[in-house]
Image: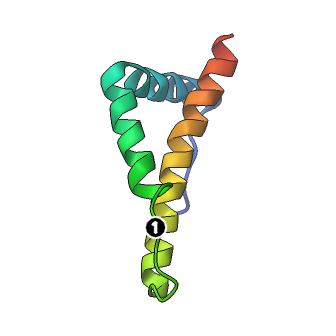
């Protein structure tokens, strides 16, 4: 497996603004709200298998990544 390569800083800024444009309008917010409910708002039983816990945590991390990209775009744009 090849190591992950990050894009140059200017491409990364563009990518952040693309995340914000994708999720900041009403349909995008509806999708993000749905992802939050399905992941951050999800509860597993105490006897849930480790694989289920890891899977849900990965999904939560992805939602957090989207939100971070949007927030960082706003802070760069003023």
Q: How is colour applied across the structure in the image?
A: rainbow
Q: Is residue 5 left or right of residue 44?
A: right
Percent across and percent down for residue 72 are: 65, 28
Name the residue carrying label 1.
56
At label 1, counting other C-alpha atoms closer than 10 Å, the crowd grade (few under 14, some 14-19, many 20 or more) is: some
Q: Residue at x 60, y 38 (%)?
A: 68
Residue 45 image position (x, y, % from top left): 47, 80
Kindly identify the residue that appears in the image at 57 percent across and 34 percent down.
Answer: 69
Residue at 40% x, 29% y: name it.
Answer: 29
Which residue ends up furthest to the left in the rendered image? 27
Vertical position of residue 65 compared to residue 48: above or below = above
Residue at the image position 41 percent from the left and 28 percent from the top: 23
- Name the quadrant containing residue 24: top left
Compared to residue 33, the image places residue 62 above or below, namely below
Please name whichever residue, 45 or 12, is drawn nearer the observer in this view of the structure.
Answer: 45
Displayed quadrant of residue 21: top left
Q: Is residue 49 placed above or below 62 in the rendered structure?
A: below
Numbered disc total: 1
Residue 61 location, x and y as percent? 54, 56
Quadrant for the C terminus in the image: top right
Which residue is at the front of the view, 40 or 71? Answer: 40
Residue 17 placement (x, y as % from top left): 51, 22
Q: SS class of the residue under badge 1?
A: helix
Farthest residue, direction top:
78
């Amino acid at each position: 497996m090849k190591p992950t390569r990050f894009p140059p800083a200017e491409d990364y800024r563009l990518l952040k603004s693309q995340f914000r444009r994708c999720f900041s309008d009403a349909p995008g917010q509806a999708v993000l709200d749905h992802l939050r409910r399905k992941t951050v708002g999800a509860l597993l039983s105490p006897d849930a298998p480790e694989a289920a816990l890891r899977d849900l945590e990965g999904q939560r991390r992805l939602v957090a990544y989207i939100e971070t990209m949007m927030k960082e775009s706003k802070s760069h744009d003023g």
